Amino acid sequence: KEHLPNVNGFVRSEPGGFFMMDEYARHAEKVYRFQPRNDDVWVVTFPKCGTTWTQELVWMIMNDCDKVRGKAPLLIRSPFLEFPYMLPPGTMPAELTKMMVTLEKVEEMPSPRIIKSHLPFYLLHPKLLDTCKVVYVARNPKDVIVSFFHHHQLMEIHGFSGDVETFAQYFMDDELMFSPFFPHILDAWSKRHHPNMVFLFYEDLKKDLRGEIEKVAKFLDKSLSEEQLTDLREHLRFDNFAKNESVNMEAAKQFGGIKMDGHFIRKGKTGDWKNHFGPEMNKRIDEWIDKNLSGTDLKFVTEL
Ligand code: A3P
């Protein structure tokens, strides 16, 4: 691939199937069999849908809004299940490898564990939803494409050299890691009424953060005081979140591989796609969305 030199290390599970680094493929079975616990909470998302935001929200609710313990890096407090198997051994900076929370370490973590995964349900333990609570977050695909594009520029390992419209085409052709997008979202959407599942939208978090915090707290059988609610809302507000060193990944820049002038907590807007796509590309994306949503009752909000 001209603009994605590093996709040569990727594999597809089957024609049209899941697209991921071959290191993951070598461990996929082990990840699939990773046993959830009854008191786990899993945050499952397609990348760039608001995962980090939701992980912090869930962690805080589950830990009585403990800001002191909350200073530890989110990556440690809420491990990213498949992350250790995304890069070939030896390609990650030694400092990061030391911090890596392997499956073996996740197995030893005390309850309640807050586990993040970008894998679709069909690649996670088949009894996941019958065992523990899952918070799934979706976001409109236009903003996901834009956010993922910036992520590919931020993380130098991707080596992406094309423009955003070229990237959008790769996205729609399911040629980026964690693709394809729609089966991921639609599989989760079909499970949204399961009692152990809450299905959130990034756009609702933007519109009514306080209401969504209350919704998640209720789902997790936790009650927050008025003061905690107000405080958590402030804690999660974009401006504060972007400055929060336990979640913003700025510290990881010292290890290299991350563009110095980019930010993981980047813009936090709904509708940024309007600043990226021309009318032709926008039309093509609309058609792709319509085709994939036809026959479903899932609707995305693309502007607020
Ligand atoms: P943008 O690139 O559009 O800014 P993920 O955690 O799944 O990788 O998602 C990252 C996206 O969520 C980024 O989107 C990021 O800025 C946004 N985000 C993170 N924290 C946020 C917050 N507190 N409020 C709004 N958006 C947030």
Image: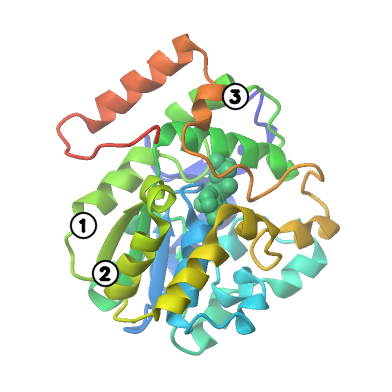
Residue pointed to by mark 3? 164
Secondary structure at badge 1 equals loop
Residue 197 falls in image quadrant: bottom left
Q: Amino acid at mark 2?
A: Leu
Q: Position of residue 257 (x, y in %)?
A: 79, 49
Secondary structure at badge 3 equals helix
Q: Amino acid at mark 1?
A: Lys
Q: Amino acid at mark 3?
A: Val
Disc on the earlier residue, 1 or 2:
2
Indicate if the residue with disc 2 has its beta carbon within 8 Å of ligand 1: no
Q: Quadrant of the C terminus?
A: top left
Q: Quadrant of the N terminus?
A: top right
The answer to whether residue 125 of the structure is visible from this angle is no
Determine the CA span between mark 3 and mark 2. Answer: 36 Å
Secondary structure at badge 2 equals helix
Residue depicted at 56% across the width and 83% down the height: 66
Q: Position of residue 264 (x, y in %)?
A: 66, 50
Q: Position of residue 280 (x, y in %)?
A: 46, 9
- The dot on residue 191 is 1
